[in-house]
Image: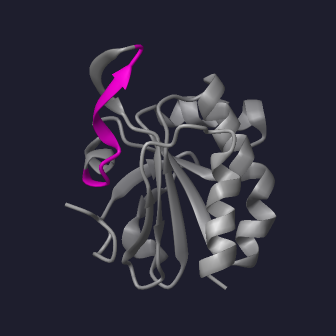
Amino acid sequence: MPLIDKPAPGFDLEGSDGKRHRLEDYVGRRLLLFFYPKDNTSGCTKEATGFRDLQPEFDKHGVLILGISKDSVNSHQKFIANHELNMVLLSDPNATVMKAYKAYGEKTLYGKTVSGVIRSTVLIAPDGTLKKHWTKVAKPDQHPAEVLAYIDEYCT
């Protein structure tokens, strides 16, 4: 079932900042969640640093960015330090939230079907509805600019 124009699934996850983060904490704000497989890997680093570099542009539209992976908070903190990331990363060790957002499941990896994190991104409107869902992001280095282009066009 598509998630677009439906209430975004709730979440309650520990963040790299040592705080709990819940969807209801962000009511009234645009929230961008990007789901990624693993801290400090090539594609994930390119995606996260892309969002880091474009953060001032996202700020102009009032968009808060949070990254979510199965990695631990400790791993997230190292990832942030290694790449000077400027966003909070949330830990979803059991992939509960990722499953709710269709960011975990079957995918093809090197010609084999496996279960795992599906690199994807969602934009949640200030009223808590899911407004855009980028499924199966293929080019993590280009994705942040693609997301920003959508926000520039539709969220002004």
Q: Quadrant of residue 2?
A: bottom left
Residue range corresponding to the magenta coloring:
100-110
Q: Position of residue 17 (x, y in %)?
A: 59, 50
Do we see residue 62 in this rendering?
no
Query: Does residue 9 appear left or right of residue 117 in this picture?
Result: left
- Looking at the picture, tell me which residue is in the foreground, 12 or 50: 50
Q: Quadrant of residue 22?
A: bottom left
- Looking at the picture, tell me which residue is in the foreground, 131 or 79: 131
Query: Does residue 2 appear left or right of residue 74 in this picture?
Result: left
Q: Residue furthest front?
A: 111
Q: Quadrant of residue 77?
A: top right
Q: Is residue 27 above or below residue 15?
A: below
Q: Residue at x 71, y 55 (%)?
A: 145
Is residue 46 covered in magenta? Answer: no
Q: Is residue 25 above or below residue 112?
A: below
- Looking at the picture, tell me which residue is in the foreground, 49 or 93: 49
Q: Position of residue 114 (x, y in %)?
A: 28, 21
Query: Does residue 35 appear left or right of residue 57 in this picture?
Result: left
Q: Position of residue 34 (x, y in %)?
A: 51, 51
Is residue 103 covered in magenta? Answer: yes
